[in-house]
Image: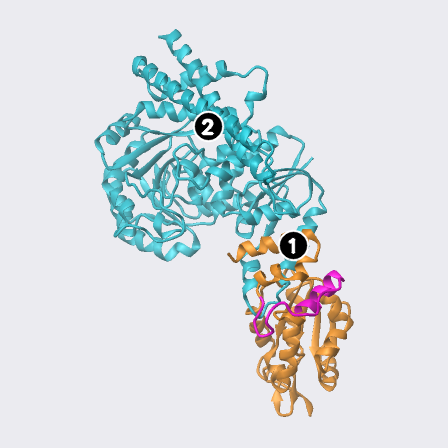
Chain colours: A cyan, B orange
């Protein structure tokens, strides 16, 4: 079997989907897995032996070919066509598009295979998703909502594979890069100073103060400033002010460094995603357009810090809406240094205390729920009931998008056992009485929503009968309404099952 | 008048009507510098059109830099003969077309074959000084950024009959948006249209 995985976003986005490759290789042990990516992602090739063949598109070149007058009008078209025609000669059994963009949709529409998963346009321009999970991603990805899944989870669910591992390993060349740094064998904190987006940057002076404070707090530790060759000058500036070590490394070398270090402090970068392939503890600074709910550090027991600001996360495009870079200013260096120190010693009790004491910053601890999803738990636990709502909502979506309702025996019972275990882990020792009261409220509210949705669906069906309207539009509306009604129905059943379980165990 | 002179480092260089067609001191270094500014698509296209034969050093450098076929457009037959005495280009890789006008350019078999697949056009300014209009016209034909040249190229690719009435003002440089809207794309294979739409996403 030959599988082609298409990921036409940036480096960090590709790293985020590598667990899917691992999951696919477990599900289809004899399959050959190839990838189609943008050119800069190819630097991962030596670190990802799971992939047999790398196809790359040079997006920048294609783009410039369209705009520059001295390049023939049809060159980009001809080059793209010739490249994709060669890909088509491979006769893939399955093409999986893990990019949710129109560009990738057209590319995947052009590519031919026995089966497809993910967005692909047909010749008429109709978007085909091939999975409810991808349709969900398309509809909800743009909404600033709190109930969105981490993208890694969406892709794992859509491909019907389980999370196994991050299949990235450094090569000897990467390890040699790190050896050449001659770092001492002592506890190491790695700081990734810069991101690709100014809005996500913490700021030079904040980093300098943080490093100075951390070194004073933990004199036995060494601090290493990680950067790419393009960042070298700026990294060395900070190193001069702080006395920290400098590590200008390739991606291969960066992974080798992460694997022999203890803590990483980073913004939303590809280095952060790379850290998932190591045992390093991660402190993520969620700034600017960083959307931790969707792209947060996936490893469990990582820490995410985000300022409590209404504008977070801000849109990717467009300047900061605030007069100053408020999200960065809210994450004060002393706060981050204390958090890093606690994380360095896996001192979650202290981090709990810090989170309760700090009214300006949200502290989130990442977890993998028994129900199969990534979750960032607010450590202040100011709203335990909201936490319960969030995980019930996730389970509801899982049942809906996996179309569990079509099975004769839907496993509400097993799921509620997992839900109960999860509630106990997230909210240890919390009283059941308020929880049960809130579940009553949720059941009533959701039940009303279900009744409203069912009535609206019935009325819609009556009104459309006999009308000569655009059938596809009607079908689309009807599908939407059916989904709303079904979602409410599933949620009510989950809540009832959970209530029964909690009452029995009280 | 064509002369072959020996440069400072012993390289043979062509001089035409008193003008050197390559550096007298180091034509190889000059050719390498010329190519360094023109690397787009070189590793991907099937054909590279070179406008102007010069003293041939840029063609040699190109041969090492790409596996594409090279089609050199040069109107001066005497120059072609003089360069042949300096360089022996592999016949299976390099074709020199003696072209005196755009009509003969369009008629040349190697040009027609090259246009059917992916190609880029590289101009060699030292060779073009004496025939600016011709080379400008050739560049326009090959770059395809006006209706007439574009339909000529598309017709070669697709082999279909197309409208001869321009859909776009003749003085406006075409863009990918125009390409999608014109009938020449609407009449093409549906799958090719998908690629045009994909490319359009890159310039949004």
Q: Measured from the top left, where is residue A97 in percent x and y?
A: 58, 41
- Specify the quadrant that holds the N terminus of chain B: bottom right
For residue B19, what is the image quadrant?
bottom right
Secondary structure found at label 2: loop
Residue at (72%, 66%) from the top-left corner?
B114
- Whether residue B14 sits left or right of residue A136 in the image: it is right
Residue A41 appearing in the image = yes
Is residue B25 a member of the stretch shown in magenta? no
Which of the pair A429/A478 is nearer the observer? A478
Alpha carbons under labels 2 and 1: distance apart? 40 Å
Q: Residues within 10 Å of mark 2 (few under 14, many from 20)?
A: many
Chain under callout 2: A
Give the dominant element type of the magenta stretch: helix, strand or loop.
Answer: loop
Secondary structure found at label 1: helix
- Whether residue A383 sits left or right of residue A180 in the image: it is left
For residue A267, what is the image quadrant?
top left
- Whether residue A219 sits left or right of residue A377 in the image: it is left
- According to the picture, the residue beneath numbered tag 1 turns out to be B193
In this rendering, the answer to whether A492 lies above or below A218 is above
């Amino acid at each position: 079997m030959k599988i082609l995985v298409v990921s036409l976003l940036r480096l960090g986005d590709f790293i985020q989907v590598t667990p899917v490759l691992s999951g696919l290789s477990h599900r289809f042990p004899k399959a050959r897995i190839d990838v189609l990516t943008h050119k800069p992602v190819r630097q991962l090739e030596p670190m990802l032996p799971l992939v047999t063949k790398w196809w790359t598109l040079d997006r920048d070149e294609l783009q410039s070919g369209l705009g520059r007058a001295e390049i023939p009008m049809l060159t980009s078209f001809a080059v793209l066509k010739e490249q994709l025609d060669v890909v088509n000669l491979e006769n893939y059994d399955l093409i999986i598009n893990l990019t949710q963009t129109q560009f990738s949709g057209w590319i995947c529409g052009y590519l031919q295979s026995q089966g497809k998963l993910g967005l692909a346009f047909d010749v008429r321009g109709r978007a085909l998703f091939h999975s409810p999970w991808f349709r969900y991603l398309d509809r909800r990805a743009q909404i600033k909502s709190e109930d969105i899944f981490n993208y890694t989870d969406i892709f794992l669910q859509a491909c019907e594979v389980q999370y196994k591992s991050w299949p990235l390993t450094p090569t000897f060349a990467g390890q040699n890069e790190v050896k050449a740094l001659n770092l001492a064998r002592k506890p190491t904190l790695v700081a990734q100073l810069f991101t690709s987006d100014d809005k996500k940057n913490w700021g030079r002076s904040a980093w300098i103060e943080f490093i100075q404070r951390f070194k004073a707090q933990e004199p036995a530790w060494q601090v290493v400033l990680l950067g790419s060759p393009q960042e070298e000058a700026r990294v060395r500036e900070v190193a001069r002010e702080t006395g920290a070590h400098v590590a200008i490394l390739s991606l291969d070398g960066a992974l080798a460094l992460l694997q022999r270090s203890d803590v990483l402090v980073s913004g939303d970068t590809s280095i952060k995603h790379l850290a998932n392939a190591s045992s390093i503890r991660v402190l993520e600074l969620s700034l600017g357009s960083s959307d931790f709910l969707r792209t947060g550090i996936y490893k469990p027991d990582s820490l995410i810090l985000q300022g409590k600001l209404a504008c977070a996360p801000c849109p990717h495009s467009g300047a900061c809406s605030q007069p100053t870079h408020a999200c960065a200013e809210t994450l004060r260096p002393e706060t981050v240094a204390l958090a890093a120190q606690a994380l360095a010693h896996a001192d979650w009790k202290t981090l709990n205390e810090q989170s309760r004491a700090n009214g300006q910053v949200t502290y989130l601890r990442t977890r993998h729920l028994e129900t199969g999803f990534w979750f960032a738990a607010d450590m202040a636990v100011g709203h335990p009931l909201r936490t319960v709502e969030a995980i019930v909502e996730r389970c509801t979506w899982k049942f809906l998008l996996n179309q569990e309702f079509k099975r004769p025996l839907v496993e509400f019972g097993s799921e509620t056992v997992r839900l109960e275990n999860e509630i106990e882990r997230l909210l240890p020792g919390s009283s059941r009485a308020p929880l049960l009261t809130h579940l009553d409220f949720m059941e009533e509210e959701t039940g009303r929503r279900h009744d409203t949705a069912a009535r609206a669906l019935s009325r819609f069906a009556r009104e459309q009968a006999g009308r000569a309207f655009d059938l596809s539009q009607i079908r689309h509306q009807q599908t939407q309404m059916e989904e709303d009604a079904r979602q409410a129905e599933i949620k009510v059943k989950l809540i009832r099952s959970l209530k029964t379980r909690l009452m029995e165990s009280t | 008048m064509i002369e072959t002179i020996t440069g400072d480092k012993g390289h043979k260089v062509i001089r035409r009507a008193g003008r050197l067609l390559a550096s007298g001191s180091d034509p190889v270094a000059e050719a390498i510098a010329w190519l360094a500014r023109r690397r787009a698509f070189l590793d991907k296209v099937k054909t590279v059109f070179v406008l102007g034969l010069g003293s041939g050093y840029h063609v040699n450098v190109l041969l090492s830099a790409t596996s594409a076929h090279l089609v050199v457009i040069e109107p001066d037959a005497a120059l072609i003969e003089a360069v042949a005495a300096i360089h022996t280009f592999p016949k299976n890789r390099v074709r020199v077309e003696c072209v005196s006008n755009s009509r003969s350019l369009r008629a040349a078999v190697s040009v027609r074959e090259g246009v059917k697949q992916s190609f880029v056009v590289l101009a060699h300014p030292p060779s073009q000084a004496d025939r600016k209009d011709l080379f400008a016209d050739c560049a326009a034909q090959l770059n395809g950024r006006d209706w007439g040249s574009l339909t000529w190229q598309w017709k070669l690719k697709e082999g279909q009959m197309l409208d001869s009435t321009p859909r776009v003002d003749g003085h406006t440089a075409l863009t990918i948006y125009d390409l999608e809207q014109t009938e020449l794309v609407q009449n093409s294979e549906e799958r090719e249209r998908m690629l045009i739409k994909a490319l359009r996403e890159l310039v949004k």
